[in-house]
Image (tube, rainbow, N blue to C red):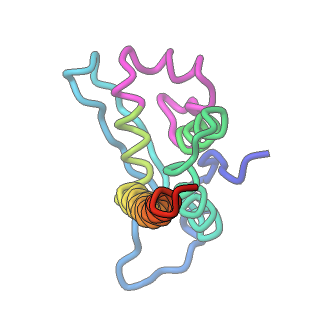
Amino acid sequence: MSIFKRNDKTEQDSAAEPQGATPMPNEKVIETRPEHGPVVSVTIRRFSAFEGWEAAAAAIDYMTEDDEAKRTRFRLNILSTATVNGQPLNSPAAINEAFKHWASAKYVFDQVLAFNEIDQVQREFANKSWDAAGARVAMAFAAHTESMLRAAEEAAQTIQSTGE
C-alpha cells in the first residue's frame, strides 16, 4: 500500500481548511514542454504533512538506491499524485497514455517534488557524500598498501643481507 494518495478533495473539503495569512495552494496545473510532444495539462497537488515527510525521506533513498524496482515504485508513487483529465498517473499504462515522450513524465515527476518542496539537490549531496567516502577509503587503502609494501621490501632486504 502506498503512502501517497490521489487528490480526491472536494470543494467542500477545501473550504473547510483553516484560513491562514497566505495559504499555499493545494493544487497547481502545469503544462508539459512542447519539445517533448503535445503539451499536456497536468494537475499536481500538495502532499499532506505526513505524506510530504515520508516522501522527503523516501526521496533520499530513491536518490541513492541501486534497486531499480524500488526506484520505479517511488517514481510511480510520486506520479500517481498527479492527474491528467482527472485520471491519476498511477501506472506505466496511464503514464504512456498521457505522454508521448519519457521527458514529459520526468518533468512532471520533478514538478511534483518541487511543488512539495522536496529538494532534488539532496541527490547531488548524497552522491557527493558517497564519492567523498569512497575517496577516503581509497586513500586509506593506498596508505595501508604502501606501508605493507615498505615492510615487505625491508624484510626482503634483511633476508638478502643475511644471506638466507
Question: At which x and y percent is residue 104?
Answer: 35, 28
Q: Position of residue 73 (x, y in %)?
A: 64, 38
Position of residue 59 measured from the top left corner of the image (x, y, whole percent): 53, 55
Q: Quadrant of residue 67?
A: top right
Q: How many marks?
A: 0
Quarter of the figure that contains the C terminus: bottom right
Q: Nearer the viewer, residue 13 or 58?
A: 58
Residue at screen point 47% across, 56% down? 160
In the image, residue 136 lies in the stretch drawn in magenta? no
Q: Nearer the viewer, residue 87 or 11?
A: 87
Quarter-wise, where is residue 42 in the image?
Answer: top left
Residue 3 seen from this side: yes
Q: Quadrant of the N terminus?
A: top right
Which residue is at 73% across, 47% downward?
Answer: 2
Residue at the limit of the structure toward the left, as seen here: 35
Determine whether 93 is above or below 144 in the image. above
In which image quadrant can residue 114 be found? Answer: bottom left
Residue 129 visible in the current orientation: no
Question: Eyeballing the image, is 103 above or below 151?
Answer: above
Q: Position of residue 86 (x, y in %)?
A: 54, 32
In the rendered view, would you say 63 is above or below 17? above
Q: Is residue 120 left or right of residue 2?
A: left
Q: Residue at 41% across / 59% down in the picture? A: 142
Residue at the image point whose x is 42% and y is 30% from the top = 105
**Seen in the image, is 59 located left or right of residue 110?**
right
Q: Range of the magenta residues?
A: 81-105
78 up-or-down from 87: above or below:
below
